[in-house]
Image (tube, rainbow, N blue to C red):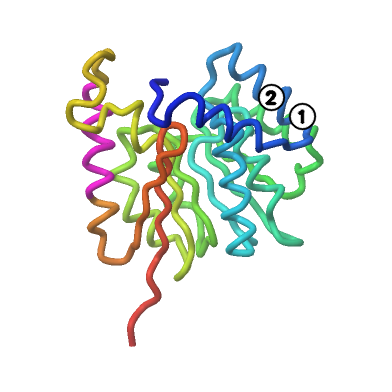
Amino acid sequence: MGHIVPEPVERYLASLNRVDDALLADIARDGEARDLPIVDAETGALLRVLAMAVRATRILEIGTAVGYSGIWLAGALQAGGRLITIEIDEARAREARENFARAGLADRATVVVGDARRMIAKVSGPFDLIFQDGDKLAYGPMLDPLVELLRPAGLLVTDNVLWSGQVVPGFAVDRPPRGEATRAIAEYNERLHTHPTLVTSLVPLRDGVAISVKKAPTS
């Protein structure tokens, strides 16, 4: 991942994020060694803050991987809350279930195996928070269905919206182009910021996180 925020600033932010959770640290180390598509601790902390801020009882996650971001989210649920997380890779989904159990969160997390573009049609809303971190080419096609599943004043949080700076014209010319995914994310960012029922702010944290709140219906 190319640096968007200067590296000294990232090191400083990481030094402040002193989460005393040996399991999360272990999963993060293993994920880095295996080059797994998981968020970093700073993004995980942001997810937990946002879930706590909306007092989430129902969260939907697209892209479970091995459960790292899901642990950050499920740990912030209100009593009796539930995380539904969708993962296309069966082996990763199995590992995620094991990690949720290790974290003592098996009763709060349901891991669904399948293509999220199809599986969301089987999911019932509303959700307080939806975290989109799945197939980047599916970001655009899934936007409106996910917004429909979100409650008014709920949050849609999207990871990788700066895509190592590739979406910024002229910024990442020294890095290998990422073609179709770059175009898909750039188009998605435009749609987020012009969507009639969303108010969006893009935070340049790590690979870019978009935070969108769903407007309440007008009478």
Which element is circle 2 on?
helix
Residue at point 53%, 34% (across, down): 87
Between the C-alphas of marks 1 and 2, the distance is 6 Å
The reply to whether discs 1 and 2 touch (Cβ–Cβ < 8 Å) is yes
From the viewer's side, name the closer residue of 15 and 189. Answer: 15
Indicate the quadrant where residue 156 lies.
Answer: bottom left
190 vs 129: above or below: above
Q: Amino acid at mark 2?
A: Ile
Q: Position of residue 163 (x, y in %)?
A: 34, 30
Mark 2, other Cα within 10 Å: few <14 / some 14–19 / many ≥20 = some
Q: Which residue is mark 1?
A: 23
- Judging by the rendered image, the residue that carries numbered circle 2 is 27
Q: Which residues are magenta?
A: 179-190
Give residue 20's position: percent from left, percent from top. Answer: 78, 35
**Residue 112 within the segment the image draws in magenta:** no
Q: Which one is nearer the viewer's eye here, 12 or 182?
A: 12
Residue 53 is situated, as x and y percent measured from the top left of the image, at 60, 61
